[in-house]
Image: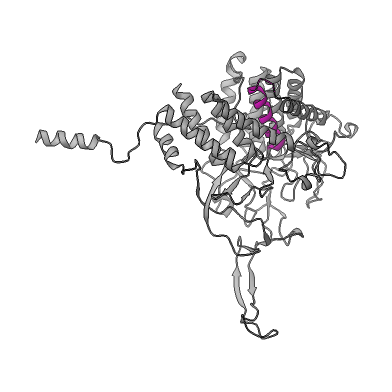
């Protein structure tokens, strides 16, 4: 019997056919080379990237860019791929990975605008490039597209790539080095006297129109959207100012330049001035020149925000770590206490079901009354070449029923406890022990949390999931650029489809019976030119960057 037990135990401990073996360093490095070479030599355009590609590489697109002559500057495309190459270089020391990151940096250099930064896409077609104010082409005419975009971490992310590649190259690449310094100079020139930045800029503003003052409540504010003229507002929305401040802190370390640190601290001073007075001592998404909370998009009213306020406190903690100045800690207890007493009771509305368990905050709190503000759901019609039109809805409401879901009018408050814990830890620690490492990672290091190092089983899965080219693919829909009509239904509607005469029928013949399709709330209708593309195998730049980074982290830990 004992022999049988021993045999059974030995059998159970034997590896199954095809069971994962611990990957060797050589195997992981070979996989990294294969994946990176495929992505650089077969996927990229001029060293840059889209969000997604079809697996056969016949088509690529992003949020703003598409096709073989454009690349995307938003984080999920060129920037994160470039930083993944840098991670691979730092983990292995192999120059090839650094060369690939350098290629991505050169693609960004070719897309730098005369105003100093970047917009969402970069065009490489020689004729189409004439429509943009690209510095590399010395094409700075006023009739060209050339607005520097600080929204969505566009310019800040591109700048971080240039700075880190510049450092890795020992500041030897003149084009990369000069482009990084030019972007930094333009960021400093665009900083308002109060220390803030706009969402977008073409040239420095008229500073005489933007006095330095503390945030305050307006006597009244418009309850209907006044229009889209908000790009000059002091903008926290999408962490715009926070990413600028942290990029400047990193620049000060990389280039040993006090001006960059001074500008970052001036931005920190703006955060202190922007904290609203009682009874709502948190922050707004954006402010006008009078330091009043202001409208931005049609679904972003003047208010105190439960969303960006959490991010602002995280950035204040970062400023304290970098400077040791306790003035950056002072606003946090009041803001935390206010936000905790502003939690929204969970209800049954659809918008609550989209949130994870835990505390709930309103994205927008009405000024002074602190009542949560919601934006009613609206029907939207888009037609190619004719823009977008709201048919109804998008009104301010005090009810969470039938509100927009494409934008978070409610946000999770789960980070409040973590922010409070971190505040207490930093407040009690020796400031000299809190400085961040000299080499930062990620495109928003102040907000990103590093993943734990991968285990062997995860690395084995990543290696085994690669195809023979070195690509990671998955099933999905890449999206279509040739959408002719889009309708979002915020209420019940009827779609009527009447087909013309069948093939071979005489012209002018009677049409077939109309088909009536009911549309309900949240339904969408899309009309594309040509047949609808089926689900297919696609390639994602974000997945490539993550997987290459995980393999690099595995090797870095092993060393």
- Predominant secondary structure, magenta span: helix
Q: Position of residue 176 (x, y in %)?
A: 71, 28
Residue 4 visible to an observer of this rendering: yes
Magenta residues span 153-172
Q: Quadrant of residue 462?
A: top left
Of 410 and 135, the residue lying toward us: 135
Q: Residue furthest left?
A: 1
Q: Is residue 55 left or right of residue 391?
A: left
472, above or below 273, in the image: below
Residue at figure coordinates x 37%, y 31% from the top left: 22
Q: Is residue 460 left or right of residue 535?
A: left
Q: Position of residue 151 (x, y in %)?
A: 72, 40
Q: Quadrant of residue 19?
A: top left
Residue 419 visible to an observer of this rendering: no
Query: Is 160 contained in the magenta span?
Result: yes
Q: Residue furthest right?
A: 208
Q: Position of residue 170 (x, y in %)?
A: 66, 20
Residue at figure coordinates x 11%, y 34% from the top left: 3
Of 194 and 186, the residue lying toward us: 186
């Amino acid at each position: 019997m004992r022999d049988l037990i021993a045999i059974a135990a030995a059998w159970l401990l034997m590896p199954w056919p095809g069971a994962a073996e611990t990957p060797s360093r050589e195997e992981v490095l070979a996989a990294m080379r294969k994946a990176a070479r495929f992505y650089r030599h077969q996927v990229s355009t001029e060293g840059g990237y889209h969000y997604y590609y079809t697996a056969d590489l016949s088509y690529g697109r992003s949020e703003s860019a598409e096709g073989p002559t454009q690349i995307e500057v938003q984080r999920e495309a060129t920037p994160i791929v470039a930083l993944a190459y840098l991670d691979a270089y730092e983990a292995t020391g192999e120059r090839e990975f650094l060369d690939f990151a350098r290629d991505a940096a050169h693609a960004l250099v070719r897309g730098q605008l005369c105003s100093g930064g970047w917009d969402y896409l970069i065009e490489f077609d020689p004729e189409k490039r004439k429509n943009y104010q690209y510095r590399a082409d010395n094409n700075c005419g006023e009739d060209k597209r050339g607005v520097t975009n600080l929204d969505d971490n566009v310019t800040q992310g591109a700048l971080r790539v240039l700075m880190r590649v510049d450092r890795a190259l020992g500041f030897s690449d003149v084009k990369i080095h000069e482009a990084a310094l030019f972007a930094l100079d333009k960021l400093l020139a665009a900083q308002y006297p109060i220390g803030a930045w706009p969402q977008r800029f073409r040239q420095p503003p008229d500073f005489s129109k933007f006095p330095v003052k503390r945030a305050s409540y307006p006597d009244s504010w418009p309850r209907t959207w006044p229009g889209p003229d908000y790009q000059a507002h002091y903008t926290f929305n999408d962490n715009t100012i926070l990413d600028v401040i942290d990029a400047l802190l990193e620049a000060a370390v990389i280039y040993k330049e006090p001006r960059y640190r001074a500008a970052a601290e001036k931005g920190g001073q703006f955060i202190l001035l922007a904290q609203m007075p009682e009874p709502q001592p948190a922050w707004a998404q954006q402010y006008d020149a009078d330091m009043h909370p202001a409208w931005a998009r049609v679904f972003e009213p003047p208010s105190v925000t439960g969303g960006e306020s959490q991010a602002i406190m995280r950035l204040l903690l970062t400023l304290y770590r970098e400077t040791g100045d306790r003035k950056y800690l002072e606003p946090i207890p009041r803001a935390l206490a206010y936000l905790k007493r502003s939690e929204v009771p969970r209800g049954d509305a659809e918008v609550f079901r989209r949130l994870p368990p835990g505390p709930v905050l309103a994205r927008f709190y009405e000024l002074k009354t602190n009542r949560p503000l919601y934006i009613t759901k609206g029907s939207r019609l888009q037609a190619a070449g004719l823009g977008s039109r709201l048919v109804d809805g998008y009104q301010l409401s005090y009810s969470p029923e039938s509100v927009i879901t494409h934008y978070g009018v409610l946000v999770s408050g789960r980070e409040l406890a973590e922010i409070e814990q971190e505040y207490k830890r930093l407040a009690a620690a020796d400031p000299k022990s809190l400085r961040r490492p000299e080499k930062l990672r990620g495109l928003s290091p102040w907000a990103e949390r590093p993943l734990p190092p991968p285990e062997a089983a995860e690395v084995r899965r990543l290696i085994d999931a690669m195809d023979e080219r070195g690509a990671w693919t998955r099933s999905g829909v890449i999206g279509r650029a040739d959408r002719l009509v889009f309708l979002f239904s915020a209420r019940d509607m009827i779609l009527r489809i009447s087909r013309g005469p069948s093939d071979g029928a005489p012209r002018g013949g009677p049409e077939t019976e109309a088909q009536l399709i009911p549309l309900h709330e949240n339904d969408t209708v899309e009309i594309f030119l040509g047949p609808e593309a089926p689900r297919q195998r696609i390639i994602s730049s974000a997945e490539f960057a993550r997987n290459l980074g995980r393999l690099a982290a595995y090797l870095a830990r092993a060393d």
